[in-house]
Amino acid sequence: MSVSTQASSIRQRIMASPVQETLVQGLPVLDYLLHGSEAMIELTTPIGQNHAVTTTLIGSDRQRYLYFVLPELPAYQRDRFFVEGYRLSVSLISERGNGAMVAFPSQIEHLMVRPLPLFTVKLPNQITLYPLRGETRYPVCLTGSVMVTKRQIEVQLRDLSIHGCSFSTSALAPAFTNEQPIMLRLESAGLGQKFLLSGTICNQRRISSNTVYGVRFDREGMRHSQEIFKWLRFDGSQMVFREPVRQGA
């Protein structure tokens, strides 16, 4: 998916969401900026020329700066758009905030090509959260699988709601495409329960070395997701399968 197509898709999801954007200020900003996340950077030169690229948020020093990978670009493009002091806007999908897009304006503070290609921007005092879905997704820690060309791939469910979920795969797993039908299989051996979450891939993003996919359930998938919640408990940070009840306990 191209940068412009990805940006257009995100804008459509924002416009379709019934929830308005919210502001986050101060130290909580860091909670929404997960290192290893894929970020969209839109740069603007002093004469009004724009250029959009994707890159990776390396992390922060938690005091002054955010560090990003300098994208691989032809030298003439890099010298034209990546200049210290040039203004830019940063957008990335947060794992928190019910799958919201995080956005904030900034400018390039420092730039380095060798030995490590990276650039820095100031740690923002304020970010805007744009909701991408109209329902709450609950963080979960559930292992499942999906069949791809007669090969079983292990997946990790990251969040779950009645209407959808997100899951991650390893770097070596085959890639899925948007609108691709999918069937996620979950099983709790201790409880003797099996669930089939069917639907279609509706979005994808990179977090560190893993790809995270969003799934929109079909009617049967929604029925099974409702059933799953009956067998989950909160462990203090996320939802997990309940422990089986021992006889005589």
Image (cartoon, grey):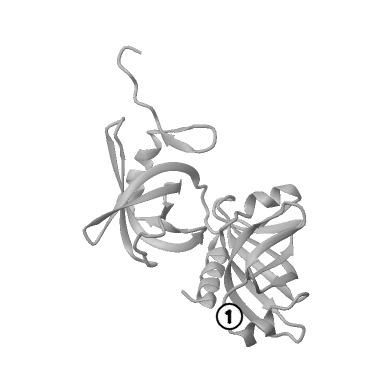
| Residue 215 or residue 15, whichever sits in front | 215
Looking at the image, residue 238 sits to the left or right of residue 183; the answer is right
Is residue 25 placed above or below 191 in the rendered structure? below
- How far across and how far down the image is residue 6, in percent? 51, 72
Image position, residue 105 (x, y; %): 72, 67
Decide: is 48 above or below 11: below
The local crowd at label 1, few if under 14, some if 14 to 19, many if 20 or more residues have their Cα within 10 Å, is few
Classify mark 1: helix, strand or loop.
Answer: loop
Residue 190 image point, x, y percent? 31, 30
* Residue carrying label 1: 73
Measuring 65% from the left and 49% from the top, which residue is drawn there?
31
* Residue 217 image position (x, y, % from top left): 37, 54
Outermost residue to the top: 248
Q: Quick check: 151 above or below 115? A: above
Residue at the extreme left of the image, as rendered: 150
Q: Which residue extends farthest front?
A: 115
Image vertical order of residue 222 relative to residue 206, above or below: above
Residue occupying the point 70% across, 48% down: 28
Q: Image quadrant for the C terminus?
A: top left
Q: Is residue 35 left or right of residue 212?
A: right
Residue type at the position of mark 1: Leu
Q: Quadrant of residue 176?
A: bottom left
